[in-house]
Amino acid sequence: MALLHNPELRFVRPPTSPAGVDYFQADDLMIVLMHVHKVNQLHPRPASQGGLPRRRTFVAVYLTTQKWTQVEIGLVLSVGGIVALIGQMPGGAIVDAVHSARKAAGLALVAIAISALAYAAWPIFPVVMSAAMLHAAASCILGPAIAAISLGLVGPLAVGERLGRNARYASLGNGVAAAVMGACGYFLSSRSVFLVTFIMAIPTLIALSRIREHDIISEHALKAKFNKVPTSRSLSLRDLIRQRPLLIFASSVLLLQLANAAMLPLMAGVVTTRSAQWAPVLIAACIIVPQAIVALTSPSVGRFAQQWGRRPLLLLGFAALAARGVLFASISDPYFLVAVQIFDGITAAVFAVMIPLIVVDIAFGSGHFNFAQGIVGTATGVGASLSTVLAGYAADRFGSSIAFLGLAAVAAMGLIMIWTIMPETRRHVLAAPKDDVRSAP
């Protein structure tokens, strides 16, 4: 069986085009606006960076004002979540198959804008259900398309730093989106949240158009250009899903989300019980602290991943998650719980970069890079879904401290898996001839 991971591919980082235009400027703007526009992108990243719960909150509030029952609201949210989960791999396969990841991203953004407008204009069950399904399906295409654009702009050796920049702007965009949507919901109406989402599609698409199509080199073209080998033969999906590093990594991501997704909601319940008056402020602080750490440190994570390798950072992320669970179980002062969220920021910063980066390491050149993203994305969704159910049961049955310790134990299992069986996937730069340097046409 052909080995997908080849550590001796020859790539170099293009700082600028011949005209001096920075290749990183246009897609930086795209990432900012895209995440302002689309808060709940379902991408392979830690749940603590959060978009999905926040958008679900806006949807639930809006539909409640429209006299919907909780059963109807729950059904819409559940169906949207199911579509988003089962659409991860098909969405990646679609991006692999199309000739332009930029056009795929643009169509996905249009679909999300239409779904937001449908929420605002016709809040009746058939329309809202269709909008939720459309939004979820578009999310499954948009995430892989962003990663494909990033890879096409810089190549696999520079993509670590690029993904770090993506994570920074995603975090900033999430914060801005929360502030804008919250302000619109408070000062105007809950309906205005969706109208703002629709309007934001316009500058997002303009930013996307600033990325020139010929600057985004396809996966196979990149491999042919820099590795000087034929790339006409793609590996089969069967070969891809049998790759041991991919299976191990997807399993570790499932454990990550199983341990992580329920921690903040469970801690929010504890804070509300212990300090009901200050609970909203404390919970908001617990969300802001990790976002700030992600924004500050993600580009450094990408650089360190290339210098040190992937495994040390993965171990750091899981260790921080396990420590967070233990501290949540042992600290009773709700104000100190905010400080514990620093560990959440470390985990979020690490995995925001490492998840797509390791998929690049493993699947680049296979012809199914985005499908591999979908595999890991499915593991993310399954782990997050099981986490809230199992942690909620443990908290009701044995108390919140035992539930937190159980989540910490799951994180420790992920740590052991990375330490013992996960191989290093970092690619190494070889001395490439000058004509190997990527330049714009």
Image (cartoon, helix red, strand yellow):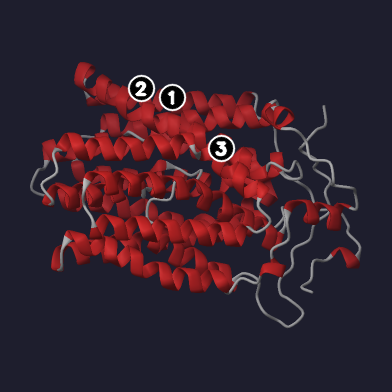
Three-letter code for the amino acid on which mark 2 is drawn: Gly
Residue linked to disc 2: 406
Q: Residue furthest top?
A: 397
Residue linked to disc 3: 89
Compute the Cα span from label 2 to label 1: 6 Å
- 121 left or right, relative to 202: left
Three-letter code for the amino acid on which mark 1 is drawn: Val
* Residue 121 drawn at (x, y percent): 24, 60
Vertical relation: 319 (above or below) 232: above
Q: Nearer the viewer, residue 421 or 65?
A: 65
Say which quadrant the C terminus sits in: bottom right
Q: Nearer the viewer, residue 236 or 272?
A: 236
Compute the Cα span from label 3 to label 1: 25 Å
Q: Quadrant of residue 117?
A: bottom left
Q: Nearer the viewer, residue 23 or 241?
A: 241
SS class, disc 2: helix
Residue 290 is marked as none
